[in-house]
Image: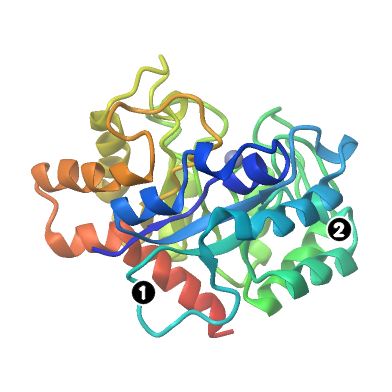
Amino acid sequence: MFIADGHCDTLYEIGICHTAPEKCVVTRERLKAGGVGIQTFALFAGIHGTQGTPYQDGLDMIAAIPKTGVEMLNGDLPENPPETPKGIISCEGGEMFEGSMNRFYEFMEKVRLRMVALTWNFENEIGYPAVGGENKGLKPFGFELVRAMDAAGVRADVSHLNERGFWDLMEKAELPPIASHSDCRWLCDVPRNLTKEQVRAIIDRKGFIGINFFAKFLRADGVATMDDVVRHIDAICEMGGEHVLGFGSDFDGISVWPEGLGNPADFPNVLEALRRRGYPEQTLRDIAGLNMWRVLKEGEKK
Ligand SMILES: [Zn+2]
């Protein structure tokens, strides 16, 4: 079964923290063992926001790509989902562009960015983060960037974005937005998770939601099990979201995870849990990877 994952922070580990590739949670061997055909590798803008050096860090992470040992798909995607592990590139934290459209195009020339998380956990030139609670919308550069992303078939990723920014995006963006690694806020009340209204909007627009495996986003007490992952998936499916759901593991970016879901080799365990829960095989295939594949392909038709 084709499996796709919407988010990991492995390039930050290798390129910025100088972690040895074989010490990372996401390795080619584990992707292969888990049957992952597409792993999204994020260029993460870093924990210092605009006070750091996100642009240079982005270049350093791009330079680290070969060390992953995973072939990146930089052109249009093949006709069918790959059977061996391949990577695609996203950006997590638009401060990497330092408020410059030229920087955005520069990155686009170096790598095929498939999605851009407009913010991480800090205010930047684009807008405001979910963490922090500001009730302000996208900034002028944010609107300009979203227009350029639409034209280039690059998805706006709303994981980490605040609610006002989310609704601005829903109004202005042509391409349905994605939330690459967020869970349900009504099941676990943290600002990084999506409200019911946001999930409804993403379903209505046929976007994408990648379930985050971070135990603290799955359960308020941070002691999550596989049942909690299933609970979040159930909740979105109950709203009619089985065609927008997938995974956004956040591996190499999270510190606690449910037992049996600690690295990419464990993906089949989630599918087995859903199978036991009675999910039909076609829905399993959709959630495992085909929903994300659809969203990526639709971006290319632009
Ligand atoms: Zn994140």
Query: Where, by quadrant of the figure, is residue 253 drawn?
Result: top right
Q: Position of residue 263 (x, y in %)?
A: 38, 39
SS under mark 2: helix
Return the disc, 1 or 2, that comes first in the chain's sequence: 1
Amino acid carrying label 1: it is Pro
Q: Which residue is disc 2 drawn over?
A: 140
Q: Residue at x 25, y 43 (%)?
A: 270
The answer to whether 278 appears left or right of 200 in the picture is: left
Checking the image for residue 149, the label placed there is none
Q: Identify the residue under disc 1.
A: 81
- Ligand 1 shows up in which quadrant of the image? top right
- In the rendered image, residue 73, in percent from the top left (x then y), is placed at 54, 73
As drawn, is 236 to the left or to the right of 278?
Answer: right
**Is 205 on the left or on the right of 36, as rendered?**
right
The N terminus lies in quadrant: bottom left
> Compared with residue 266, is residue 89 higher up or lower down, i.e. above or below?
below
C-alpha gap between disc 1 and disc 2: 37 Å
